[in-house]
Image (cartoon, coloured by chain):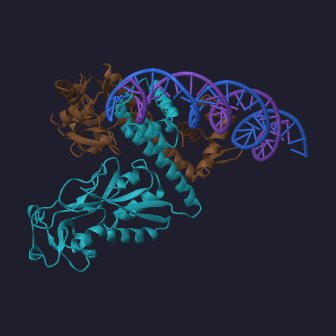
Chain colours: A brown, B cyan, C purple, D blue
Amino acid sequence: METRELRYFVAVAEELHFGRAAERLGMAQPPLSRAIAQLERRLGATLLERSSRAVVLTEAGSVLLDEGRAALDAIDAADRRTRRASRAAEGGAGVVLVSKAGAAQEILAKLLDAYAAEPDAVAVEVVLSGVGEQERLLRDGRADVALLHQPFDSTVGFDFEALRTENQVLVLPSGHPLSTRTRLSMAEAADIPGLPLPRWKTCDGSYPDGPGPEVHDHTQLLQLVALGRTAVVLPESARAQLRDGLAVVPVIDAPQVTTVIAWPPHSRSRAVAGLVRVASRL
Amino acid sequence: METRELRYFVAVAEELHFGRAAERLGMAQPPLSRAIAQLERRLGATLLERSSRAVVLTEAGSVLLDEGRAALDAIDAADRRTRRASRAAEGGAGVVLVSKAGAAQEILAKLLDAYAAEPDAVAVEVVLSGVGEQERLLRDGRADVALLHQPFDSTVGFDFEALRTENQVLVLPSGHPLSTRTRLSMAEAADIPGLPLPRWKTCDGSYPDGPGPEVHDHTQLLQLVALGRTAVVLPESARAQLRDGLAVVPVIDAPQVTTVIAWPPHSRSRAVAGLVRVASRL
DNA sequence: CCCGTCGATACCGCACGGGTATCGACCCAG
DNA sequence: CTGGGTCGATACCCGTGCGGTATCGACGGG
């Protein structure tokens, strides 16, 4: 099975429309139809049921969509990491570390400082991504190592090491009646009149329904809290970056948050190993 | 990057010899040289340093070898699982479960029985593999779900659920002086005069050095114990399959063994989900 | 010093991927 | 019921690119 065929199939399976898929791929529709038919012949499997009105995935087709996306990610990763390794030999960044924008700031700073002091350190490029995008970057090779937060981020499919565990606090506008409390429960935090909890992007890229604002990163989030539009439960290390106008109250029964450093399981990169070694000694 | 180019590169990187790689690929040497040169041009990276006497991998080349193997496994997996899903629609086996030959026998039997009683059960093909081969089968799609034993088998890169944890016992020929003991330490078990511990295949496919026999599966292993050639520390559930001529002694300080059911992290197969659900309820 | 080894280059032919034109099935409007 | 519009499949053509053979050039060893 060739990469090109896989890309064609994934495009058709996502669009469920040969014409639009061909347009997205920058080619004409007939060769695309032919390529899919040939792929089906070679696999000995019907991937799509077509009528002139609708195209639907068969069971085998939906398996190939899942597995094919994973395979294409692996190929993109091979491509990007090879280019990066080559550029590193000429003085470019040797490794890319991704972290949620606004989260784990002190750990990140300490890690970069400590790693830079290592004898075999290479240049580290830092990417600050939106919430939930890190897994994808790690999978398709745009990043080599990530700082994640359990239980919010999924570590499934990666190798990881825990760095720190902490409790959570409610962040709300200072002056709000609840800001004088010394502690709160999750139930109280989730149901504050006039301050609905924000909605994060879910893993499929959409936002759940609800009254709260849609948020993408921590900076945006804290601004919304200061404006009195929302309140949010965050790890207590968020205290370090609180601006004026914000107050925090410990939430007793919130799940503990563990910051972990994660990497692709087959990684044999010395740079990644060095970062992990330094991180676990912080 | 095309699958074909990746296969070519991996062959050359493994052989470190264009002629032999071409032979292995069933093609002539010149087009292979050209394909690698073109891959290097497209990536903008030198993958191999060639002289007329030797071919060696560059740093970028060794990254591409690692990442490329993972990507080729993912593509093979997509191919095999799609074919399987298609055959399942025509009454074939819908899911392949792999377990070490001779290990976890009662759990395996109970799992298969309980799953077959489920309303949405599909046919399960059972593959009994050699020690350490399961990860590979799961990665390249020859299997969909596996029974593994921590800490011996690596669960890195897979999602898994623990099924049972047990202590370990020393299995040795009945009549051996130590067989009358009620308990032993690891230190004692590892150093029995005349009964060296066996050597398992390591993850790179070779055997470690040492005096013990090279073993591949449990059946072979128990036979060697009965013949008085070796003694081995195994989970206590191995008692259930002991034949005559074997005795067991608990090993106090051996690490506990956890039997887990593992699957590829992106799996959305209903059959795999069903097996996992049934297994975790056993 | 010449021969053997090994990767690179030169050149050729065909298979295959992609393009355009068109067909056939299907749905809906009138 | 029929004509137009949509959509995937088919027919046919062309050019690229992959694989083959022949040969070269570099390098080491007997």
**Residue B186 drawn at (x, y percent):** 11, 62
In the image, is residue B261 above or below residue A33?
below
A195 or A62: nearer the viewer: A62
For residue A207, say whether it is visible: no
Farthest top residue?
Answer: A91
B63 or B195: nearer the viewer: B195
Quadrant in the rendering for residue A125: top left
A63 or B4: nearer the viewer: B4
Residue at image position (40%, 42%) is: B70
Question: Horizontally, is D12 left or right of D8 in the view?
Answer: right
In the image, is residue A175 above or below residue B252?
above
**Residue A49 drawn at (x, y percent):** 65, 49
In the image, is residue B277 above or below residue A171?
below
How many numbered badges does the structure rendering display? 0
**Residue B165 drawn at (x, y percent):** 23, 63
Residue at image position (24%, 55%) is: B151
In the image, is residue A89 above or below residue B207?
above
Q: Quadrant of the C terminus of chain B?
A: bottom left
Question: Horizontally, is B260 left or right of B168 in the view?
Answer: right
Residue at image position (47%, 31%) is: B33
**Residue A106 drawn at (x, y percent):** 20, 28
For residue B127, say whether it is visible: yes
Farthest bottom residue?
Answer: B244
C13 or B233: nearer the viewer: C13
